[in-house]
Image: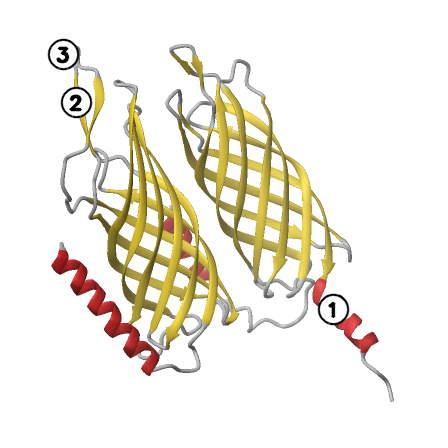
Amino acid sequence: MTHLKSIVATTLLLLSITAFAQKDSTAGEFTLGMRTTVSSFTDAGSVGLGAGGQFWIRITKHMNTVWYSDYINTNIQNIGFRRDGHIGWSVVFYMDKDPLLTHKITPYILAGQCFDYTNVYSDYYNYSVERWSAAAAQGGVGATYKLTNHFDLSLIALYMMHLGKHVETEVDYTEQGEKYLTITTPQGASLDGHLLITLSVNYMLGKL
Amino acid sequence: MKNTFLGILLLVSGTTCFAQSDSGFVHKGILAGVGTVGVGEMPAHNISNVYVTGNIEYYTEKCISVRGDGYFFVNSLTPNSPLKQNSSVYFGAFYHFPTHSGFDPLIGIQPGLAFARTSDSVNGKADPGALSPITSFVIGFNFFGEKWFHIQANIRYTIGQESTEESQYNLSEISFNFGLGFNIDVIKQHKHYRTIEEPTF
C-alpha cells in the first residue's frame, strides 16, 4: 500500500512539473459540466445510476484535470440498496497531436483519486453500514467530442478501487428460497471497486 | 440508449452551427423561461402523474443552450397510487438543430435529483422519502413565433430509483409537457445599454 501511494504521489509530482514547464495558450481553460454515471461490477451484478457535476481546468495542450462530485444510487435486486458519494479529481492525458478540436473525437487516458462515502442497507436484516474512505483511486479511458468551440460531450470509463475499509455484499437464499442480502465489513484493505461509466455535457466558460 | 443518443448527436453535429446562415430566429443570447403542466407515465408501475413544470434556458451559442428544469409533483392520476411525492430538478445542455425559421427542434441530456416518497412502510414506519439521483434524455422543440413569446413541447425519459429502508421504488418515467414561454434577448439589450453609456463627441 505504501509503495502504491509513493508511486502515485511521485508520478503526480513529475507530471505537475512537466505540466507547468510546458504551459501554453490553452492553459487555464475552465469548463463546467453536468454528468450522469452508471456504476457496475458491484453489488451482485446490480447496476447503479448517479448524477453529479464537474469542472475541468486545463494545464497544458495535452494535459487537463477534471474535478467531480457524484451521487450514485444502486437498487440491489430489491433486497437492499447502496448509496455512493464521490468527490475526486483525475489528471487527463490527451494522446492526439492536436486535442480538443471542434468536430473531432479526442481520446485520452486519465487517473486520479477520490473521497468515497458508501451506505449499504439490507432489507432482510433491517441493517445498514456506512463507510467513509479517503483512499479510492481510479483510472481509465475517455473520449471527448466537441460540437462547438465551447461545448463538448464526454464519455469516460473508470475503474475505481476502494483502497480503504470496504463493505462487501452477497446475495444469499433462505431455506424457503427467499433472497436476502448479507453485508460484511472485512478487516484490512482490499482492491474491490466498481466500473463507472460517465456521460457528461460540458461548456467552456473561459480562461482562469 | 446512451450509445444511440451519442450516435445521433455525432451524426447531426456534422451540420455545424457555424455553417448556417444567420436567418431564423434562434441565436446566441436568448434567455427563455417556460411554466406549464406536464404529465408522466411510469411504465414499471403503470401509473400516471401530473406535475407543474418550469424551466429557464440560455442560448450560449446558436445551437447550444444550458437549461434548468423543475418538476413539482401535483398528484397521481391513477387511483391508489403508492407514489406520494416525486418532485425533481434537472440541469443540463441541449443541442438545437439549425433551421431557417422560428422552429427550434432540440435534444438534450439533463441529470438531476428527485425527492420521492411512497406510502410504503416497514414495521409501522412510513417511508420518509429520499433524494435520489436521476438522469433524463429530452427531445422537443421551441417555436419562436413572436419577439417575446414562444411555445415549447418536450418529451422526457427519466431514469431513477428511490431507495429508502422502507421503499425501493423505480422512478423511471416518460413525461410530456407543452406550454407558453417568455424570452428576452440578453446580448442585444446589453449592447444597447453600452451604446447609451458611451460618450459622444
Q: Assign a secondary structure to mark 3.
A: loop
Q: In this rendering, does residue B13 appear at all?
A: no
- The residue to which callout 2 is attached is A172
Which residue is at 33% across, 45% downward? Answer: A38
Depth check, front residue: B26 or A202: A202
Which residue does the numbered mark 3 point to in the structure image?
A: A175
The Cα–Cα distance between marks 3 and 1, rounded to whole angstroms, is 72 Å
At label 3, counting other C-alpha atoms closer than 10 Å, the crowd grade (few under 14, some 14-19, many 20 or more) is few
Tell me residue B43's x, y (percent): 44, 28
Q: Residue furthest right?
A: B201
Quadrant housing the C terminus of chain B: bottom right
Residue B179 coordinates in the image, percent (x, y): 69, 41
Q: Mark 2 touching mark 1, by CB under 8 A?
A: no
Residue B121 lies, with reference to residue B141, above or below; the image says above
- Give amino acid for label 3: Glu
Circle 1 chain: B
Q: Quadrant of residue A184?
A: top left
Q: Callout 1, which amino acid? A: His
